[in-house]
Image: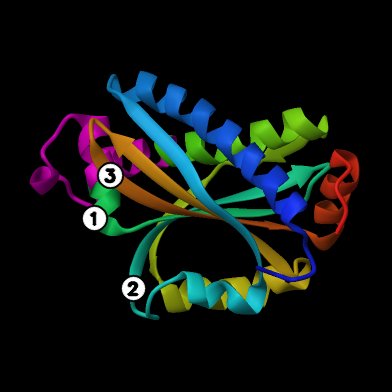
Amino acid sequence: MDDRFSLTQLDVLKEIGTIGAANAATALADLVRAKVEINVPEVNIVPLENVARLLDSADKLYFVLDMEINGDVLGRIFLLLSPEDAKLLGSHLLGKPVEELDYKDDMFQSALKESANILCSSYITSLADMTKLTILSSVPTLAMDMVGAILDFIFIQIAQYSEEALFVKTNLKVEGENMHGLFLFFPSSDSLRKIFEILGVKE
């Protein structure tokens, strides 16, 4: 945890994440027509230079959903899924066995993008509802990349406007099968201060 932020601030952010997860579970359940459970066991704010500790080795692959955030809050969101978890989720979305799925298949990528978009948008919606701010998101992009390339992008592009990452660990269970996502929200420094001021929580 970044020691510039209090436990009260993290509690508020976890509450927002929990509300977002509940909304996302409902939406995903409708999409896959199956029981979906999502919980948020951990929320932390970490300095950008510590993001590498949240990920695995530099050559670890992730599916990365990338969304730009604008409006009253500026920043960027990444949702990272391991290829194994991405295929498991894709099998529920498409009703196909895992072994029949191809990472390069357009239908697989489209289904994965739609589900990841639901997860990210649910968090943003809960944040907007709680703060009464207008928060807009771009059309998401989806790619599979190595940790090293992801970190390079973060340090080159995101470090220009953000000093911290909001890390939300997300556990997803579909029909009893467990998947894990890493949700990284990089709000601009001014946006993060604005959120806390509106919510009335201090450092």
Colour scheme shown: rainbow
Q: Which residue is mark 2?
A: 60
3 or 1: tag closer to the N-terminus? 1
Q: Which residue is mark 3?
A: 178
Label pair 3/1, CB-CB below 8 angstroms? no
Q: Main secondary structure of the magenta part?
A: helix
Q: CA distance from mark 3 to mark 1?
A: 11 Å
Q: Position of residue 94 (x, y in %)?
A: 22, 31
Disc 1 residue crowd, few under 14, some 14–19, many 20+, Cα 10 Å: some
Q: Position of residue 21 (x, y in %)?
A: 51, 35
Q: Position of residue 161 (x, y in %)?
A: 78, 67
Q: Quick check: 32 left or right of 26?
A: left
Which circle marks residue 84 in the picture? 1
In the rendered image, which quarter contains the N terminus? bottom right
1 or 2: tag closer to the N-terminus? 2
> Does 156 appear in magenta?
no
Residue drawn at the location 71% of the way across and 70% of the way down = 2
Q: Quick check: 32 left or right of 149?
A: left
Disc 3 residue crowd, few under 14, some 14–19, many 20+, Cα 10 Å: some
Which circle marks residue 112 in the picture? none
Q: Amino acid at mark 3?
A: Asn
- Per the rendered image, the range of residues in magenta is 88-114
Q: Which quadrant of the structure image shows residue 162? A: bottom right
Q: Amino acid at mark 2?
A: Lys
Q: Which quadrant of the structure image shows residue 48? A: bottom right
Residue drawn at the location 24% of the way across and 55% of the way down = 84
Residue drawn at the location 34% of the way across and 79% of the way down = 59
3 or 2: tag closer to the N-terminus? 2
Disc 2 residue crowd, few under 14, some 14–19, many 20+, Cα 10 Å: few
Q: Nearer the viewer, residue 93 or 2?
A: 2
Q: Nearer the viewer, residue 143 or 188?
A: 188
